[in-house]
Amino acid sequence: MPSSVMPTPNRSDGHPSSIAVSAIGLRKSYGDKTVLDGIDLTIPAGSVFALLGPNGAGKTTAVKILSTLITADDGQAQVAGHDLAADPQGVRAAIGVTGQFSAVDGLITGEENMLLMADLHHLPRAQGRRVAAALLERFDLVEAAKKPASTYSGGMKRRLDIAMTLVGSPRIIFLDEPTTGLDPRSRHNMWQIIRELVSDGVTVFLTTQYLDEADELADRIAVLNDGRIAAEGSAEELKRLVPGGHVRLRFTDPAAHHRAARALGEVTRDDEALALQIPSDGSQRDLRTILDRLDTAGIEADELTVHTPDLDDVFFALTASTVPVQSGRPGQPKENAR
């Protein structure tokens, strides 16, 4: 399935938005295995970008390259305006990274973890203490600050991990599967933290296997498969790439059901349930067309339901993968009653 090519977002003044991350033709191989096969990325500043893909698709490799942890075999990239190859120090000064596995030291307290990070950023002692205290309060860790981090729950460790990442005031944060293993409440708390970061102007590059997480948070989503970007766009744009969307109309009057079937033309009839199913991409324009035809014929449906594919459907259609991904909900099409 072809990738959707989207224009660079514009600000209201007509000038192109500032770009946080730009990559062209990134490639990486390990021996005979090609992990990234020439991927292109453009991520506007102050947005959430989600990279989806099955295990081993190359998500973590992309994060490691863009955060200067490893080098690409080929391609060019700029992060926060700094060239990845020519100015890696400039990139490191502008970013924060929270990996799949917590960087928290369990042998020391939460506060000591924060102060250690402040020392690594060469903050003056007094400033480091102020920054640490403010972040511990922001992430609701004040009561636990004097306790060894080994006693923290999974959600608390993830919050501390991100708080440590923010000590250096990064403009771009890479979150590599930040909610894996967290309970539902902790996941939702993490989502709120990510939203607050973006509202403060931070750009978030998120990798995840939870499809509902990408749907909930991301402004743009790219699906990585076999080392290439299979498709990219907003969640709604990606859902429209997958067939199967439809509008279902239900009637209580058999005569209205019959007249609607004639007025709408290409429908699937369910005479027993007095229902009609009309192929639709779920867009506002498509829905308006159906309603206009009903209005013209003087017909009113008793119930209208829009069925659209979800990101589970998109993922499997684009990757043709048998590897299970975690949606956080049953993998059924959404039904939005209107």
Image (spheres, helix red, strand yellow):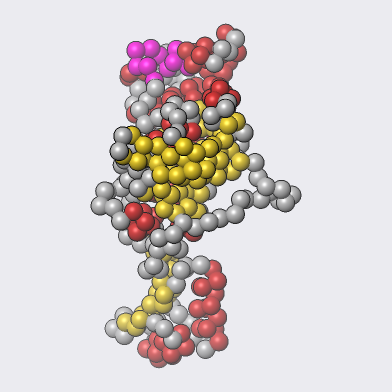
Question: Could you say which is closer to the camera, residue 96 or residue 194?
Answer: 96
Residue occupying image coordinates x 58% and y 13%: 123
> Residue 338 appears at what percent x and percent y?
47, 68
Left or right: residue 300 compared with residue 226: right
> Residue 192 appears at what percent x and percent y?
48, 39
Does residue 218 appear in the picture of this structure?
no
Residue farthest toward the right in the current orientation of the protein: 13
Residue farthest toward the left in the current orientation of the protein: 322
Question: Could you say which is closer to the camera, residue 184 or residue 3?
Answer: 3
Left or right: residue 335 compared with residue 232: left
Q: Quadrant of residue 336?
A: bottom left
> Residue 227 appears at what percent x and percent y?
38, 45
Identify the image quadrant of the N terminus: bottom left
Residue occupying image coordinates x 37% and y 88%: 254
Q: Examine the structure image and report whether residue 102 is included in the region drawn in magenta.
A: no
> Residue 245 appears at what percent x and percent y?
40, 68
Q: Quadrant of residue 255?
A: bottom left
Number of residue marks:
0
Residue occupying image coordinates x 56% and y 12%: 122
Left or right: residue 87 compared with residue 35: right
Residue occupying image coordinates x 43% and y 68%: 306
Does residue 309 appear in the picture of this structure?
yes
Left or right: residue 134 compared with residue 146: right
Question: Could you say which is closer to the camera, residue 23 or residue 306?
Answer: 23
Q: Is residue 90 above or below residue 288?
A: above
Q: Quadrant of residue 187?
A: top left
Q: Is residue 120 above or below residue 271?
A: above
The stretch in magenta equals 104-114
Question: Could you say which is closer to the camera, residue 32 or residue 333?
Answer: 32
